[in-house]
Image (tube, helix red, strand yellow):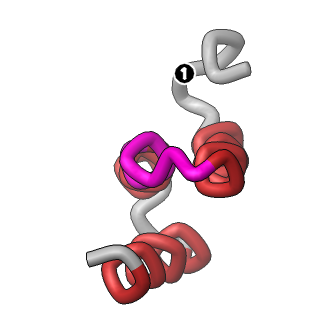
Amino acid sequence: ASALDPEDWHTYHLLGHAYYRLGDLQSARVAWERTLALNPGFQPAHERLQQLDTQHP
C-alpha cells in the first residue's frame, strides 16, 4: 500500500500496527518513525514508539 503513495503518513501508521500485530517490532518501529518523518505532530505515532521503548527495550 505504501508503494501507492510514499508520502502518505497514514499508510505508514497503519503499516506499523500491522507489523506490531505480526510481532515484527523492528519493522513497526521503522514504519512509525516514517510516519513521524512525514507528520511530526502525529501524537499516536509518538505514543506507539514510546510504548515500544517501554515494553520492548
For disc 1, the marked residue is: 6
The picture places residue 49, in percent across and down from the top left corner, at 42, 71
**In the picture shown, does residue 41 fall above or below 40?**
below
Q: Splitting the image into 4 quarters, where does residue 56 fall?
A: bottom left
The magenta stretch spans residue 25: yes
Residues shaded magenta: 23-30
Kindly report the secondary structure that dominates the magenta region of the rendered protein: helix
**In the picture shown, does residue 8 fall above or below 1?**
below
Identify the residue at horizontal 47%, vertical 82% (top origin): 51
Q: Splitting the image into 4 quarters, where does residue 17 fall?
A: bottom right
Q: Amino acid at mark 1?
A: Pro
Q: Secondary structure at mark 1?
A: loop
- As drawn, is 37 to the left or to the right of 35? left
Identify the residue at horizontal 26%, vertical 77% (top origin): 57
Identify the residue at horizontal 66%, vertical 46% (top origin): 22
**Among all residues in the image, which is located at the extreme left?**
57
Disc 1 residue crowd, few under 14, some 14–19, many 20+, Cα 10 Å:
few
The magenta stretch spans residue 41: no
